[in-house]
Amino acid sequence: MSRTHADPGLQPERTLLSWTRTLMLMLVVGGFFIRWAPYYGAVVLGLFGAAALVAAGVWAGQRRRYALADAGIAAEQYPPAVGGALSLSLAVMGLGGVALVLVLL
């Protein structure tokens, strides 16, 4: 990925690393759902699939998020990533809600 700003340690690189950690965490959460398969059956495969889809969505948006952040710093007008953060928050709350229902029932 090419940079348009002078400092290589600025926000786009740190943000990219943060989203990558989030992607890996979603795959780990999906792995924990797989461990529940003996207790809850095939339902957890759907949870794993949903977690994997969220991780794939994060991965698919990496290049675009980096380019927007890089251009924003160069132009000194950094746009917030409201859509990505909101969709990730809703996905995590949904996965957590379904997992909570499974555990309580």
Image (cartoon, rainbow, N blue to C red):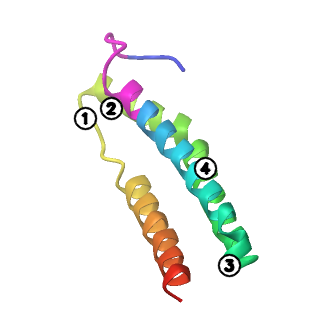
Secondary structure beneath label 4 = helix
Please report contact status of discs 2 and 1: CB closer than 8 Å, yes or no.
Answer: yes
Q: Is 6 displayed left or right of 36 in the figure?
A: left
Q: What's the mark number on residue 102?
A: none
Determine which residue is flagged by label 2.
72
Q: Residue furthest left?
A: 76
Amino acid tagged 4: Leu
- The residues bearing labels 4 and 2 have C-alpha atoms spaced at a distance of 30 Å
* Residue under the image location 52 percent in, 47 percent down: 25
| Residues rendered magenta in the picture | 5-15
Give the quadrant of the C terminus. bottom right
The percent coordinates of residue 33 (x first, y second) are 62, 64
Q: Are marks 4 and 2 in contact (CB under 8 Å)?
A: no
Q: Residue 20: percent from the left, percent from the top?
A: 51, 37
Q: Nearer the viewer, residue 14 or 84?
A: 14
- Quick one: label 4 or label 3, which is nearer the N terminus? 4
Choose the circle earlier in sequence order: 4 or 2. 4
Q: CA distance from mark 3 to mark 1?
A: 48 Å
SS at mark 1 in the image: loop
Q: Name the residue at 53% across, 38% down.
A: 62
Which residue is the site of mark 1? 77
- Residues packed near mark 3 inside 10 Å, few (<14), some (14 to 19) or many (20 plus): some
Question: Which amino acid type corresponds to the residue marked 3 in the rendered image?
Answer: Tyr
* Label 1 crowd (10 A; few <14 / some 14-19 / many >=20): few
Kind of residue at disc 1: Gln
Q: Which mark is residue 40?
A: 3
In the image, is residue 11 part of the stretch drawn in magenta? yes
- Type of amino acid under label 2: Gly
Q: Nearer the viewer, mark 4 or mark 3?
A: 3
Residue underneath mark 4: 27
Q: CA distance from mark 4 to mark 1?
A: 33 Å
At mark 2, the secondary structure is helix
